[in-house]
Amino acid sequence: MTANKRETMAELVALTAEREWLRRFVLSKPASDGLPQKVSARLTVRRGQKILFFEESYPGGRVRQFALSPSEIPSVLPDKIASYLQADLVTPAASVVLLRSKKGTETLRGEAALRRALNETDGAPLLSTLTKLDREPRRILSGEEPFLRALGVSDEKGRVHDKRQPKFRQINRFLELVSDIYGELPDGDAPLLVYDLCCGKSYLSFALYHYLTAVKGRRVEMLCVDLKEDVIEFCRGVARDAGFLSDGEGDGMSFRAQDIRRLPRDRKPDLVVSLHACDVATDVVLDAAADLSAKVILSTPCCHRYLDRKIAAPDLAFVTRHPKLRGKLAEALTDGLRCLRLEAAGYEVTAAELVDPDDTPKNTVLRAIRRPDPAKMQKARASYEAAKRFVLGDGADAYLTDI
């Protein structure tokens, strides 16, 4: 494409953006490897200013976003256009396409029709389809929270690092789930008792403590437990710097390096959370939480290797003989058995999606709310035993006894 044609297309994009005619602008057919497969743009408003909002789509579902004001388009867009064999500008009055053949022949179509339509209407808005970019999902955390900086999620200015965007979305989504069940937690002035079991680096612990105290205005006593002493020491330091650390008199965050199976059973937590406890560690968490009669449990499982090695269901051989499918089946069966076990312990259970699967394949959250009903519990126990027999055959009685 000649510079003149690129500049002409960029001029038309800027003109239609400024006059609110632009419906869509798309670059496709990259001219070389390594480029986004497609670049699409729409006209929108951010902080009261018109902008052209771009999304670059890469292989594997990765997306990069950026924005240009109408005044920036003529200087920036020609170089972008030069990297593609096709550029399409769509308006309510006419469409313009810029093509480059494999032999290098360049064609600009639709320019005259668009300019004629602009002249006939004196450039007045023809059919404004402006949307507000500010309508993006409102997140509970902004990125400016001190604990996010300490954990390396955001920088000193509160900007979330690009590589940490999935983690940031995951944390916010988890807080949305907490918001959904907040009404199930006790009211009053007494502190909420919260356990984070197999807490790891405690991204969730700090976010949850911030949400319950700073957003909801509650007093909170939070215990975070993990086997790794070095991780627990790191978390204590972050909590101390953030002003979250308990002084030993109740309110605040405390951290303990120990096996969660040895937790004292003298207190009933209001909320138990666990993010990505690996394989049977999730079962240990769920059993401990149920044994403690926690009011609400939120758990996101990770890995399902244990059951994968033990499936002995001849009727499922058409699936289990394929390793890839066997792994997916083991995941669904494991979490299904967990749901039944919690129901047998007196919980109402749902399995929901945590975040977009592109962010993480570990994408299921189990939500359990304690509402004991003897009849439902008895039915769930019978279903659990029958399901174990079907999946594990003679190994049903030994399921989870060796962890």
Image (cartoon, grey):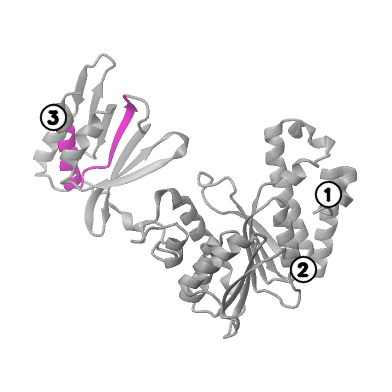
Q: CA distance from mark 1 to mark 3?
A: 71 Å
Is mark 1 in CB contact (under 8 Å) with mark 3? no
Q: Amino acid at mark 3?
A: Ala
Q: Which residue is mark 3?
A: 112
- Where's residue 375, x and y in %? 82, 67
Apparent side of residue 124 relative to residue 97 in the rendered image (left or right): left
Give the quadrant of residue 311: top right
Q: Can see residue 179?
A: no
Q: Residue furthest right?
A: 394
**Vertical order, 271 against 34 (above or below):** below
Apparent side of residue 118 relative to residue 227 in the rendered image (left or right): left
Q: First in sequence: mark 2 or mark 3?
A: 3
Q: First in sequence: mark 2 or mark 1?
A: 2
Asked whether residue 352 is drawn in magenta, I would say: no
- Where's residue 66, x and y in %? 30, 46
- Where's residue 223, x and y in %? 62, 71
Q: Which residue is mark 1?
A: 388
Q: Which residue is mark 2?
A: 291
Q: First in sequence: mark 1 or mark 3?
A: 3
Q: Identify the element where label 1 is drawn.
A: helix
